[in-house]
Image (tube, rainbow, N blue to C red):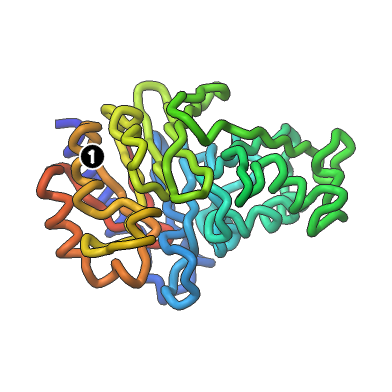
């Protein structure tokens, strides 16, 4: 079948071409395929500083060009370079939500892009805000606006940008149940839905590339029960494995447990599932996690690590 063959090819390519995390990538950067659609894990960890991983971030590669950056957690800008990606190739950056472990490298990307060759406007999309969190437009302004943390970068928000291109941000509704689909290029189309991540405004994103798609759920607890329908028949469901099956209390208010991931993946008929945002409380429990997911889902299940690349 096409599904099994594609996943097997991705596994073989990864095993043959990637190096261990202890080795340097400077002379032999990990590569995705030259053609087709690939998901690269820039950061597979969460907010911890003792997990030996970068935090949540992903690249969508299309025909060997990095076209979409999903989240920009700590370490993402360094691994973006090690992955061989070019900032000028990006169509957009999208945020699932604005927690530190999903956003802190954003100003590093913008500052670093001064030395790149980007000439076209860069679109930034993410959730609107509430009493606890700023909206995406406000976040960007607080980072690089005239009254922001790095006001010397304010001209990136204007047509006079010293970087050679303009940054524009847009808020996407993170309440209710309505699907947003307001951006597309010749390479991809984006859509988003609100998801429940405790009190934090959050979104899941679907990336459509011709007849293929990838869904990035971000952090969510599935209280809204929208993800399975949103991810229907997706080629890859990239979701977060932040808590074990036994989690209780506040952790369950913020995240899905593995058995819920399996149920969602089955209902969505997802071709494969990638588990990112792995934390110390879930590492070392891969056997238990796999058993819980596979109670309902029988497709390929991949545990993400930094810089791994999976083809559709």
Residue 92 vertical position relative to residue 11 in the rendered view, above or below: above
Q: Which residue is mark 1?
A: 265
Q: Which of these two is toward me, 9 or 277?
A: 277
**Whether residue 50 is situated above or below residue 236 in the rendered picture:** below
Q: What secondary structure is marked by label 1?
A: helix
Looking at the image, can residue 11 be seen? yes
Relative horizontal placement of residue 139, taking residue 271 as reference (left or right): right
What residue is at 63 percent from the left and 58 percent from the top? 105
Instruction: Tell me the quarter of the image containing the C terminus.
Output: top left
| Residue toward you, 280 or 188 | 280
Q: Position of residue 135 (x, y in %)?
A: 65, 42
- Hey, which quadrant is residue 217 in on the image? top left
Q: Residue at x 63, y 34 (%)?
A: 171
> Left or right of 139: which side holds 286?
left
Q: Quadrant of residue 53?
A: bottom left
Which quadrant would the N terminus be assigned to in this image?
A: top left
Residue 217 against residue 188 in the figure, above or below:
below
Kindly identify the residue that appears in the image at 50 percent across and 49 percent down: 199
Indicate the position of residue 145 as horizontal and vertical percent values: 82, 48
Residue 20 x, y percent position in the rendering = 36, 70
**Dot 1 crowding, Cα within 10 Å, few <14, some 14–19, many 20+:** many
């Amino acid at each position: 079948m096409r599904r099994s063959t594609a996943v097997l090819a991705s596994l073989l390519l990864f095993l043959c071409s990637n190096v261990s995390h202890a080795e340097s990538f400077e002379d032999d950067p990990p590569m995705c395929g030259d053609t087709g659609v690939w998901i690269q894990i820039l950061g597979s960890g969460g907010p911890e500083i003792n997990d030996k991983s970068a935090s949540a971030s992903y690249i969508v590669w299309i025909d060997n060009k990095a076209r979409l950056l999903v989240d920009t957690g700590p370490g993402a800008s360094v691994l973006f370079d090690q992955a061989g990606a070019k900032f000028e190739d990006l169509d957009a950056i999208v945020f699932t939500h604005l927690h530190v472990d999903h956003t802190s490298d954003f100003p590093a990307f913008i500052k670093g892009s001064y030395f790149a060759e980007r000439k076209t406007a860069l679109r930034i999309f993410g959730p609107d805000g509430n009493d606890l969190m700023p909206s995406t437009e406000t976040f960007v302004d607080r980072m690089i606006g005239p009254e922001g943390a790095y006001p010397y970068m304010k001209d990136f928000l204007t047509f006079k940008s010293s970087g050679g291109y303009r940054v524009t941000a847009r808020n996407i509704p993170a309440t209710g149940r309505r699907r947003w689909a307001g951006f597309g290029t010749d390479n991809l189309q984006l859509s988003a839905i609100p998801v429940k991540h405790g009190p934090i405004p959050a979104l899941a994103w679907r990336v459509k590339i011709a007849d293929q798609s990838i869904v990035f759920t971000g952090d969510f607890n599935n209280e809204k029960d929208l993800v399975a329908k949103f991810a229907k028949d997706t080629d890859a469901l990239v979701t977060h494995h932040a808590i074990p099956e036994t989690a209780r209390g506040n952790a369950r208010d913020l995240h899905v447990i593995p058995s819920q991931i399996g149920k969602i993946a089955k209902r969505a008929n997802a071709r494969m599932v990638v588990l990112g945002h792995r934390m110390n409380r879930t590492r070392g429990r891969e056997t238990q996690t796999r058993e819980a997911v596979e109670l309902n889902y029988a497709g390929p299940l991949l545990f993400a690590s930094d810089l791994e690349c999976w083809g559709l």
